Image: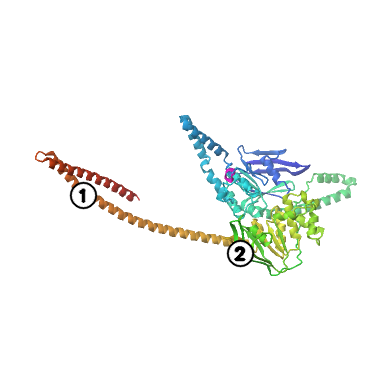
Amino acid sequence: MLHLQNISFEFGGNYLFKNIDWFIKPKERIALIGKNGAGKSTLIKLIVGQYELREGSMNKQGDLQIGYLSQDMISDDGSLTVLQTAKLAFKEAIQLQSEIDELIHKIESDPSDVNVQALADKQERFNVIGGYDMEHKTAEILEGLGFKTEDLDRPLEEFSGGWRMRVILARMLLEEPDLMLMDEPTNHLDLPSIEWLENYLLNYPGTVIIVSHDREFLNRMTTRTAELNAGQLYLWDGNYDFYLKAKEERDLLLARKAENQKQYIKEQEKFINRFRYKATKAKAVQSRIKMLDKLDAIEEIEDDQSNMNIQFKLSTKSGKVVMKMHNISKSFGDNEIFKNVDLEINRGDKIALIGANGTGKSTLLRIIADTEKYSGKRELGHQVIPSFYAQHQLESLNLKEDIITELKQEAPDRSETELRSVLGSFLFSGEDVYKKIKVLSGGEKARVALSKTLVSEANFLMLDEPTNHLDMASIELLIDALEQYEGTLIFVSHNRYFISKLANKVFWIEDEDVKHYPGTFEEYQYKMAQRKAQKETVKAEASKASSEKQSKNNWKQKDETAAELKKIKQKIENLEKQLKSLEQDKSKYEEQLAHTESLSEEDIVELSKKYDASLSSIAKLNSTMDDLVEDLILLEES
C-alpha cells in the first residue's frame, strides 16, 4: 500500500529522524506516538506531500487516496452551511448533479434522443457513486459528531473553531480515503462524539494512522504502534497498553546490553592501555583498537521526563464540607441550563463533571468558582482555598514576565528547582523557562496557567480541560500528582483515561438538574449501560405490547370486515332477485309492445312508460351492483 524507505528529514542542521523504513499495509489501525518534537507531524506531512521528500523514497500504490486531518486546517468558505461544507466530499456527485440539472433544462426545449440518453447515463453514474444518498449520509455523520439537525443549514462562520474542525473531520470521513492520517482527531470532541467516532472507525475499510494523546482512544482503536524516538521508528504489534509493556521489557534489555557493552569496552581499553607499548602485544592491541572502532554503540532509548514530578504543598486543611449550593439556576436567554440545583462537595472528593458539549459543564464549573452569574445560594466551606484553571485564565498571565518568574510570584516559597520540575512536566525545559510569556503560543500559555494553578497552595482545585495541550507523558505526570493530592478536586474532561484514573464521583447535567453517581467512572459507565439496557427493554416491551394491541385491532378489523362482506353479499343477492323480476317485467312489456293492434293509444303510452321505467331501474341496479362488487373485492384483498 505505502512503503517508506530510508526516509530522513533534516531541519536547522539537525535530523528529526534518519533512515526510517516503514511498510504500511491495508486495513491497519496504527498509533503514531512519540514525545512532542519527535517528528510525528513532520512524518505525516511528508506522507501527504506537504513537505518535500529530500532523502529516501516513498512508494505508493498507484491509485492510493490519502486523507489528512490536521489541527491547523481551516474551512474553505465560512458562508457555506455546515451541510454544504461537509458535502464537498462528494465532488464528482456535486458536478454530476449540476450537469443533470442543465440537461433536464435543455431537454425541455430539445428532447432529442442524444440529450435523453446523456441524461440517463449521468443519472446512472450519479446513482452508482451514491449521489442520491449523499444528503442523508452527510447529515448522519454530522449528527454523529454532535451537530443538531437544525444546525446543518446554519452558515459555518457562525460556529467556533472546534465545531469547524468537526465539519472538516466529517468531510474527510465522507471522502473515504484508502489511507486516513489523523492528527489529534479527538480534540474538540465530547464523550458521545468520541465514542461515535470510535465505532465508525472500527468498521472503516481503509487504513488509519492516528496521532493522539488520548490513551483510551488509542487503546480502543489501534492494533499496531509506531514509536518515533531519538530519530528512529520502532514498530510494535499491539495497542498502546501493549506497547508500554513491551517497551519496558525492551528498555530493560537495551539497558543491560548497553551496560554490558560499556563493561566490555572498558576491559578492552584497559588491555590496550596496559600493553600499548609492548612489542610482543602490538598486534593484539591494534586488533582490539580496530574492533572498538567498528563497534556500534548500543544507545538506551530516551525515557521522556522520567525525573520530572509535581508535588502539592497544602498549608491548610479545609473543613469537611468544601461547598454547598442551594437552588442554583442558570439560563442563557430562553435556554435554561439547570434549575433549582442542590449540590454538596466534600473534602477529598475527586469529581468528574462529564457530558456532551453544550450541556453546561463549564458553566457549572464557573459558578462553583464564582466567576459566572447565577441565581440561588453558593457557600464556600471553612478554610477552603480555591484555585480555578480554565482557558480564560490565560488573560491573567503577565505578558511581560518570563515563565519561571510568573510561577515564582504564585509560589514564592518554592525553590527554583521545584518550579523547574513542574515546568519540565509541562514541556518547558532548559532555557525555555526564561521565555517571555508574550511570545508563547496559546497552548504554551495554557500550560503555564495550569502550572500556576498546581504550584499554588489551594486545597480545592477546579480544572476545566486540564489535559488539553499536554502530551501523554505530561498527562501521566499530572495524573500521578492529582492521585496524591490531599485536597478536593472537581474537573471537566473528555479524556476517559484521565477520568477513570482520578474520579471517585461523577456529576452530569440531565433534565435541567445535576445528577451524581457516588463511584468511579467505570462503575458509572456500568450503571449507565444497565440503565440504557433497561430503557431498551422497556421500549421493546412497549413495542411488543403495541404490536399485540395492533394484532388485536387487526383481528377486530378482520371481524368487522367479514361482517361488512356478509352485508354486501346479502345486498347483492337481493339486487340480483330485483333484477330478475325487472328483467321479467321488461320482457313482458316488450312482448306487449310487439302486439299493439288491440291496444288503445293511451294503453300504448302507459306501457311504454312502464318499459322505460324498468330499463332505468335495471341500469341503476346494475350500477349499484358494480359498486358493491368492487367493495367486495377490496375487502377480500384486505
User: Looking at the image, what colour scheme do you see?
Assistant: rainbow
Which residue does the numbered mark 2 point to in the structure image?
341
Question: Mark on residue 97?
Answer: none
Give the image location of residue 295, x and y in percent.
79, 46
Is 323 positioned to the left or the right of 604 in the image?
right
Give the image location of residue 316, x and y in percent.
75, 67
Which residue does the numbered mark 1 point to in the structure image?
577
The residue shown at (13%, 39%) is 594
Q: Is residue 189 above or below residue 122?
A: below
The residue shown at (17%, 44%) is 610
Q: Does the magenta portion include 234? A: no
The front one of 550 and 213 is 550
Q: Say what amino acid the circle numbered 2 marks.
A: Val
**Can residue 620 be seen by looking at this rendering?**
yes
**Can residue 514 be seen by looking at this rendering?**
no
Q: Nearer the viewer, mark 1 or mark 2?
A: 2
> Magenta part of the protein: which range?
81-85
Most prominent secondary structure in the magenta stretch?
A: helix
